[in-house]
Amino acid sequence: MKKKLQILGTGCAKCQKLTAQTEAAAQAVGLDYELEKVTDINAIMGFGVMMTPALAVDGEVKITGKVPSIEEIKAMLL
């Protein structure tokens, strides 16, 4: 089953890094995934996120306000 990965952020450098790290982690664990960038501030706030970037997996926010390592992201995906 495909996992839905969402990067919540306005497109800043940290958001772009989180996107790259998340894709690398998903590919490293062989995950079947769909990646969506959520840039609308109201949609981001709808997740209850006040600090970006944030990562949501299947609609559940896993981390906010920082870019975790690829290893940390892998653990969130499994």
Image: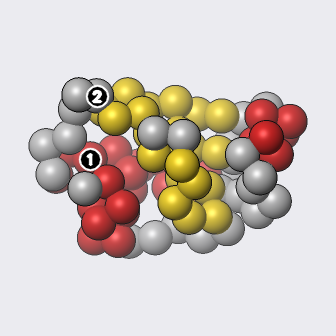
The reply, left or right, for residue 8 in relation to residue 23 is right
Q: Nearer the N terminus, badge 1 or badge 2? A: 2
Q: Residue at x 20, y 40 (%)?
A: 31
Q: Determine if residue 75 is in view.
A: yes
Q: Residue furthest right?
A: 42
Residue of label 1: 26
The reply, left or right, for residue 34 in relation to residue 52 is left
The reply, left or right, for residue 1 in relation to residue 57 is left
Q: Residue at x 75, y 55 (%)?
A: 49
Within 10 Å of the Cα at label 1, are there few (<14), some (14-19), or many (20+) other Cα atoms?
A: many
Q: Position of residue 55 (x, y in %)?
A: 54, 52
Residue of label 2: 2
Q: Secondary structure at mark 1?
A: helix
Q: Position of residue 62 (x, y in %)?
A: 52, 60
Of 20 and 43, which appears nearest the observer? 43
Tell me whether circle 1 and circle 2 mark residues in contact (CB < 8 Å). no
Q: Residue at x 38, y 51 (%)?
A: 22
Estimate the spatial distance between the alpha carbons at disc 1 and disc 2, rounded to whole Å: 11 Å
Quadrant (top left/top right/bottom left/bottom right) for the C terminus: bottom left
Q: Amino acid at mark 2?
A: Lys
The reply, left or right, for residue 26 in relation to residue 38 is left
Q: Vertically, is 22 above or below 14?
A: above
Q: Position of residue 54 (x, y in %)?
A: 61, 55
Q: Amino acid at mark 1?
A: Ala
Q: Secondary structure at mark 2?
A: loop
Q: Determine if residue 25 is in view.
A: no
Q: Vertically, is 58 above or below 2?
A: below
Quadrant (top left/top right/bottom left/bottom right) for the N terminus: top left
Q: Position of residue 75 (x, y in %)?
A: 29, 66
Of 36 and 13, which appears nearest the observer? 36
Q: Residue at x 36, y 61 (%)?
A: 76
Rendering quarter of residue 41: top right
